[in-house]
Amino acid sequence: MVDNNLLFQYLLRLGDDQQILSQRLSEWCGHAPTLEEDLALANIALDLLGQARSLYTYAGEVEGAGRDEDQLAFLRYENEYTNALIVERPNGDFAHTITRQLFYSVYMDLHWNALLSSKDETVRAIAAKAVKEVDYHVRHAAEWVIRLGQGTEESHQRMVEALEEFAIYTGELFEMDDLAQQMFKAGVGVDLTLLRPEWEQQIAAVLGEAGLRMPEVNWMQTGGRSGEHTEHLGHLLCELQYMQRAYPGMTW
Amino acid sequence: MYSQGLIGADGSTVETEEFLEAFQKRVDAEQKIEPNDPMPEGYRRTLVRQISQHAHSEIVGMLPEGNWITRAPTLRRKAALLAKVQDEGGHGLYLYSAAETLGVSREELTDQLLTGAAKYSSIFNYPALTWADIGAIGWLVDGAAIMNQIALCRCSYGPYSRAMIRICKEESFHQRQGYEILLTLCRGTDAQKKMAQEAVNRIWWPALMMFGPHDSASTHSDQSMHWKIKRFSNDNLRDKFVNATVPQAEYLGLTVPDPNLKWNEEKQGYDYSDIDWDEFWRVVKGDGICNRDRIKARQKAHREGAWVREAALAFAEKRAGAADAARTAAE
Ligand SMILES: [Fe+2]
Ligand SMILES: [Fe+2]
C-alpha cells in the first residue's frame, strides 16, 4: 500500500519542477532572440504547465483536503516548494536557458519514460502524455546547443560559461532521498541513480557534437528537495503568487 | 491582433492607364491578386505598408499581455494567456511571410520597426495595469481587431486575405476568452468589479481609436477602397464595433465611459462622443505612455539576440559548406 502523504509529497515535488521551469521560460515570451524562439519557448512552457497542472490536481485528490491545483501551485510558503534548484535559476542569456533546458529535458525524458511503468495508474497516464512532449524539448535544446557550440566564437564561449554555471546543479536531479527511496520501493517512483549513466552519455553525445564538454565538477549543489532554495526562488514566487496573495479567496 | 486604419500610406503609382485599367478590372471582378501577378507599384507599396504595420502590431502586442503571464491568477488563466500571446507571435510570423511575398524581407521590416520608421497599432502604447486589463484587451482590442480583419478577409491580395481568414478564427477565440475573464470579475467581489470597470475606462477610447482617423481625415482611404484592399471605411467599422459591444458591456454590468452614448432609434445604432483626436495623434507620433518602452523592449530583445542569430547563421553556413564538400568529394 502506498502511503498517501508520501505520494502527495512526491507529486508536489514533480509538479514543482515543471511549474517553476515553466514560469522561468514564460519570462522569455516577447523577448527571445527570434520570433521563432518566442513561439518555441512558449510552447515548452505550456507543455510544462500542463504537466504541472495534472500533477497538482492529482496531488490534491490524493491529499483529500479539498485543495485544488491553484491552492497547491500558489499558496505555499517558499520552503514548501521542493523543486530542484536548477529550475529556479534565472534565465541568464539564451545560452544559459538552453543549457538548463538540455540538462533538464534529457533528465525528464528518461524520468518520464521510466514512470511509464509506475504502479500508479494516474502517474502512468501523466507520463504517457509527457513523453511525447519532452521528446521535442530534448530535440529543441540539443539542436541549439550544437548550433551555439559550433556557431561563432562568442556563442561557443557563452556555452562554455553556461555549462560552467549549470553543471553543479545536475547532481541534485538524481538524488535518492528518503521520499524518493520510499516511492521507488512502493513501485510508484523511479530509482533515479539508474538514469544517471544514460543521462551522462546523452549529454556527452550532444556536447561532443557541439564541440563542447561537460566541465569537471567535484561538488554538487543541493537543497531544493528539502525546501532549502537559492535566493532566486523567493522573487519568482513574489510574481507567481502576487494575485492570489493580494486578492485572497477570489474566483478568477 | 491588429490592424489599425492605415497610417500614412502613399498610394501613388506610375503605371500606364491601360495597365491600371486592366488591373482594376481584375479587382472589380473580385479576382484575387497573387504574388507573381503584375500589380501597380502603389498597390504593392500600400500592401507592404499595411501588412507590415499589422505584423508589427502583433509583435509589439505581445508585450502588454506578456507582462501578465508570470502573474496570472490561476494556472488555467496562465495557460490561456501564454497560448494567446503565442498565437499573436504566430500571427506576426504569418503576416511577415505574407509581406515577404511582395518582395521585402522580414529583416528590412524589423529594422523599420526598431528605428521607428514603421508604425504599429497605437493601442499597444497603453499599459496593461491590472489583471482586468487582460480581460478588457481580449474583449475590446481583439474585438476591434476582428471588426477590421473580418473586412480584410475579402481583401483583393490573396496571401493577405488568406492570412486574415486563418487569423480571424484565433482572434475570435481571444475575444471570447477576454470577455469571459471580465464576466468572472463582474460576478466576483466589489474589488474585482472595480478592477474590471477601471480597465474598461482605460481601454474603451484607445480601442475606438484602433479604427483610425475619421473618413473625412483619412486621406488614402479612397484608393485603398478602390483597390479593394480595404472594404469598409474607418467610421463604418467603428460604428459597427460600438453597436456590437455596448450590449455586451451592459450584460457585464459595466459602464462605457462616454456620457453621450445613446441609442439612436432612427439610425438603429449608437450615437457617441467624438474621439480625442489630439490624444490619438500624440500617441501615433510617439508620445503615448508606453511608446518608448515598447520600442526599447523590442530593441533590447533584438540587440541581445544578435549573437544567437549570428551563431545560427554561421552554423548553417558551415553545414552547407560541409554538404557541398561532401557532394564534391562524391562526384
Ligand atoms: Fe493577433
Ligand atoms: Fe488576438
Image: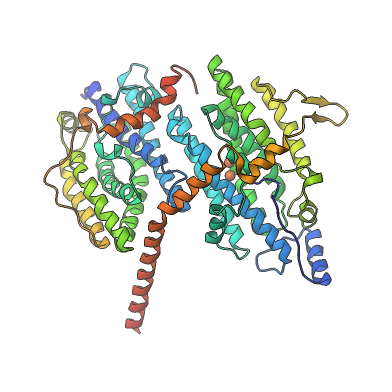
Q: Quadrant of the C terminus of chain B?
A: bottom left
Q: Is residue A150 visible?
A: yes
Q: Quadrant of the N terminus of chain B?
A: top right
Residue at the far bottom in the pictured view: B331
Q: Is residue B88 visible?
A: no
Q: Is residue B311 above or below residue B193?
A: below
Q: Is residue A89 above or below residue A241?
A: below
Residue at the far left in the pictured view: A218
Residue in front for this viewpoint, A71 or A210 = A210
* Residue B235 relative to residue A66: left or right: right
Q: Which quadrant of the figure has residue A206? A: bottom left
Q: Which quadrant of the figure has residue A211? A: bottom left
Q: Which residue is depicted at the point 27% across and 50% down?
A: A162
* Residue B262 relative to residue B127: left or right: right
Residue B141 rendering spot, x and y as whole percentages = 63, 37
Residue B164 rendering spot, x and y as whole percentages = 64, 50
Question: How many numbered dots are placed on residues in this image?
Answer: 0
Residue A196 rendering spot, x and y as whole percentages = 17, 46
Residue at the far top in the pictured view: B190
Query: Coloured how?
Result: rainbow
Q: Which residue is depicted at the point 44% across and 24% down?
A: A243
Residue in front for this viewpoint, B18 or A16 = B18
Residue B306 rendering spot, x and y as whole percentages = 41, 57
* Residue A206 relative to residue A244: left or right: left
> Can you tell me which quadrant of the image ligand 1 is in?
top right
